[in-house]
Image (cartoon, rainbow, N blue to C red):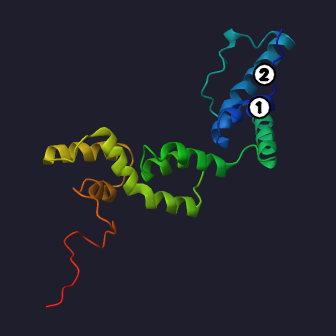
Amino acid sequence: MKLPRSLKGRALQLLAQREQSRIELRRKLLVHALAEDADARAEAGGDGGADDGNAVTPLVDTAIAPPGALVRVDAVLDWLEANRYLSPERFAESRVNARAPRFGNLRIHHELKQHSVVLSPDAALALKDSELARARAVRERKFSAMPQSAHERAKQGRFLMARGFSPETIRRALRDQPSDCDDPDMRESDSPPTDD
């Protein structure tokens, strides 16, 4: 018979697979903590069986979870953070590295916000600076040519918008030629002064 893993063991296994945010790791561990509680009740008195309507589901509402399970899970999470196994900075970095080649800043910031993780100012600036190049690369992978009509421009714009790119970045990415200076204050129509 295989012995069940502890909450700490499960957490370390999940963190070995990929970086996790505290919120998602808490949700995953809470399922196992509740299952442990149900098994303990079943062994103690037989009243924690499957027919009592308290079956564990993959999505656990922490508002209705028993306080004992929450305390055990939070203690494991605190230990993981204290020993640097769980790090919001590493999670943000790995999420940005995984999402940046395919998605825009709006989408990436939204995903991080869902995990209650904030991007560092340096990483946010680097992400912002690379957004136009990433939008152009994403557009080029999907569409072979620049839009030739208003319909094509709208189609490509919607595609980029669905990927989380900002409207200004989309406008600039759909221009015919990328200019050497993609500064919004400098337009292609601006020409250097000439000596008359």
Do tag 1 and tag 2 residues touch (Cβ < 8 Å)?
yes
The picture places residue 42, in percent across and down from the top left corner, at 80, 12
Q: For the N terminus, give its image quadrant.
A: top right
Identify which residue is drawn at 18% across, 43% down: 152
Q: Position of residue 29 (x, y in %)?
A: 71, 31
Q: Is residue 153 above or below residue 12?
A: below
Report x, y in % for residue 64: 66, 32
Front residue of 26/10: it is: 10
Q: Residues within 10 Å of mark 2 (few under 14, many from 20)?
A: some
Q: Secondary structure at mark 2?
A: helix
> Which residue is label 2 attached to?
36
Judge left or right: residue 9 versus residue 161: right
User: As displayed, is residue 42 above or below residue 189?
Assistant: above
Task: Name the residue located 21 percent from the left edge and 77 percent from the top edge.
Answer: 191
Estimate the x, y position of residue 114 in percent, counting from the top left: 54, 45
Please identify the quarter of the rendering in which residue 151 is found. top left
Q: Nearer the viewer, residue 19 or 148?
A: 148
Q: Which residue type does callout 1 highlight?
A: Ala
Is residue 86 shown left or right of residue 148? right
Check disc 1 and report the residue beneath it: 69
Q: Would you identify the image quadrant in which residue 13 lies?
A: top right
**Circle 1 — which element?**
helix
Which of marks 2 and 1 precedes in the sequence? 2
Amino acid type for the residue under numbered disc 2 = Glu
Q: Residue at x 14, y 48 (%)?
A: 150
